[in-house]
Image (spheres, grey):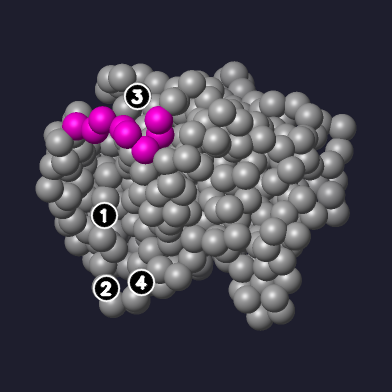
Amino acid sequence: MRPLEDVRIVAVEQYGAGPWGSLHLADLGAEVIKIEDARGGGDVGRYVPPFQEGSDSLFFETFNRGKRSLRLDVASPGGRRVLEDLVRRSDAVYSNLRGDVPAKLRLRYDDLKEVNAAIVCCSLSAYGQTGPRAAEPGYDYIIQGLAGWMSLTGDPGGPPTRTGPSLVDYATGLVAAISLLAALHAARRDGVGMDCDVSLFDVATAMVAYPATWYLTGGLEPARTRHSAHPSLVPFQSFETADGWIVVGCAKEKFWRRLAAVLGLGELPGDPRFSSFAARREHAAELLAILEPAFRARASGELLAELTAAGVPCGPVNDLPAALADPQTTARELVVETGHPRFGTVRQVGAIAKVGPEPPAYHRAPLLGEHDEAILGGLLGYDRATLAELAAAGAFGDVERPADVERPAEPAEESP
């Protein structure tokens, strides 16, 4: 069995952060039943351009492979009945909604413990379920500004800058997945479930990490650094070469000595100004004035080969095509393929949690409402009369007959 094959998760999720967390649980074998709002068009991620057609997009595909889709209005009486029937047969309810919404939709442990005493209720929100911002909407970009990230990113004198990828979203999704698994472990041990309250704001603030400790304890306010330099270790930054840019990191004294030797500057480590971490930090400007011309005199490929042979941590500054074509990317089987009825063959980055000897089996993201029939009729055992009763109670919004969904012909699923 795959590691999480005996886990069923009801995911009231949308867009990026929440689906990113449950994606990795699905990659590990969990059955993730994705609840999509029956009153609208489902997850808003289905409509993010480019490469968007109808209710499918490559954005949605990235965050939702291996999941099942059920259209449901959980705020209606009928939808609530379906939700509670799912909770009886599931291990966790996972949501990413505004911080005050889990209480309004009754998705917390106290709301569901009478249905399933061991249910785990994991909420991912922008600001958490407490505090003055709990009812505010929020997104990665906004949190990066609020938590201080943008003040630390970019070159000195430039505008506040966000990170390229949405790292707050992705990190928070992973923290939510870890929290859910920890709570599930305890629930299976003790027979009692619990809440998990995870927020973008908490995770982004925590990820400031040691600069926050420096400020809180020593009063040092970090600042942006030239060429993305490490805030305390020198040299540890990007360097311009004769034909591009590379990154070199001397996080140990031995790496600094080896770097100096490769650059033909073997005497520098003996200079008192450059003989220790503290000395190099104090005399960083003088040292970089020597190092930068030496880097610019060499071609990236040749220099990287020599540094790698000498055991100095280094790498090229790749563009995205080069990064995805890197031999290490291939060796780690990071690019995978799935078949899709609208997009043909979808190529994307695969599972990052490599657990156990068996590779993951990849399946495309679900079409909107694709698993209505299998979940309602199969898992929950509803007959047509029950479906009609639930529909009359608003469970399926404007979807009159969720058990009769027309779908495109299925392509063959592919694994790497």
Q: Which residue is mark 2?
A: 358
Where residue 362 is drawn, which disc sits there?
Answer: 1
Q: Earlier in the sequence, mark 1 or mark 3?
A: 3
Q: Mark 1 or mark 3: which is in front?
A: 3
Residue 10, percent from left and from top = 54, 51
Q: Earlier in the sequence, mark 3 or mark 4?
A: 4
Q: As shown in the figure, which amino acid type bears the numbered disc 1?
A: Tyr
Where residue 2 is drawn, which disc sits there?
Answer: 4
Does 360 lie within the magenta span?
Answer: no
Q: Secondary structure at mark 4?
A: loop
At x 77% / y 50%, what residue is drawn?
111
Q: Residues within 10 Å of mark 4 (few under 14, many from 20)?
A: some
Which quadrant holds residue 390? Answer: top right
Q: Residues within 10 Å of mark 1 (few under 14, many from 20)?
A: many
Q: Earlier in the sequence, mark 4 or mark 2?
A: 4
The answer to whether 90 is drawn above or below residue 76 in the figure is below
Where residue 55 is drawn, which disc sits there?
Answer: 3
Residue 9, percent from left and from top = 52, 56
At x 57% / y 45%, what residue is drawn?
82
Q: Earlier in the sequence, mark 4 or mark 1?
A: 4
Q: Earlier in the sequence, mark 2 or mark 3?
A: 3
Q: As shown in the figure, which amino acid type bears the numbered disc 2?
A: Glu
Q: As shown in the figure, which amino acid type bears the numbered disc 3?
A: Ser
Where residue 285 is drawn, which disc sits there?
Answer: none
